[in-house]
Image (cartoon, helix red, strand yellow):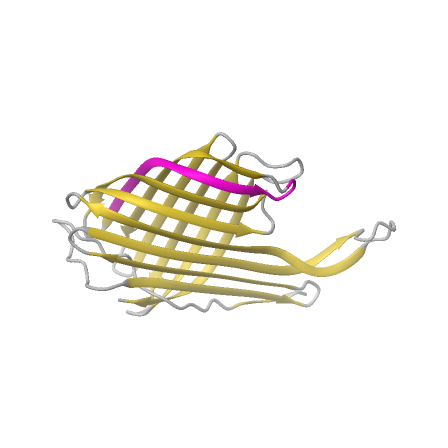
Amino acid sequence: MSHKLLLPLLLATAPLATHAQDAPATPEGWTGTGELGLALARGNARSESVNAKLAFAREDEYWKHSFHAAALRSKGEVTGDFDGDGVEEERYELSANRYELGASSAYKFDPRNYIVGSARYENDDFSAYEYQAIASVGYGHRFLDGERTKLSTEIGPGFRRARDADTGEVESGAVARGLLDFKHQLTDNTALYDTFLVEAGSDNTFLQNDFGIAVSMNEKFALKAGLQARHNSTVEPGTHKTDTLTTINLVYKIN
């Protein structure tokens, strides 16, 4: 029987604070969350996987800033004819290796409307694109900003630069960027999150949805289950357009 050990271990900080007429005042300084999840399998099957996320935010009467980073690395046993001699071999190799950095700054006209500039960079050894870098400007609006439910959207033009992993060709072009960010406090210690991102251009349309539910154990620690789906519309034959990632992480909150 295979033995699996799931040990989520996490470092960072608390939910993004908001400032609005019907919401609590925003704390001074930066707040953030950090997540870390580790999964190990031994026995008949052998694999290792680690994912980590870090997010910080700061908001005052006129400005709001955010930064995030994420990484995923997995190893596992794979079987195949690696040297072309017709004999299948078993190797222990990387099966996922990805990191992402992103940041945004927004100027608020009022508690619900703002203009935002954002940038995102990702590097993925197992994607159709070796890297993708996007910078954009846009308009944002908070549709809901209550104590329990928050919903905001952003939309605007941007510029994308990416390198095709198969051909090495570098693509550049305009994109339309859209973002939907939702949070709902189900109970005093349980929160639901969903963030949907689209970057649509003539060369490729990238979609990413992050869904999660977090249960606080105390003021500092929470357990979070998440499901991430990523989709590239243009890929080489034999490459999947959609990747999914399911995580169970331990979260450390700082506020």
| In the foreground, 242 or 45 | 242
For the stretch drawn in magenta, the main secondary structure is: strand
Q: Is residue 79 above or below residue 166?
A: below
- For the point 33% across and 35% down, the residue is 156
The picture places residue 42, in percent across and down from the top left corner, at 65, 68
Horizontal placement of 237 versus 12: left or right? right
Residue visible at 56% across and 60% down in the picture: 73
Left or right side of 159 for 129: right
| Quarter that holds the N terminus | bottom right
Quadrant including the C terminus = bottom left
State the extent of the magenta-drawn residues as a range: 150-167
**Residue 26 vs residue 154: left or right?**
left
Marks counted in the figure total: 0
Location of residue 128 (image quadrant) = top right
**At which x and y percent is residue 239?**
63, 40
| Percent coordinates x, y for residue 187 in the rendering | 26, 56
* Quadrant assignment, res 251: bottom left
Figure check: 46 above or below 108 = below
Q: Is residue 173 magenta?
A: no
In this view, the residue in front, 55 or 224, is 55
Residue placed at 25% from the left, 60% from the top?
Answer: 188
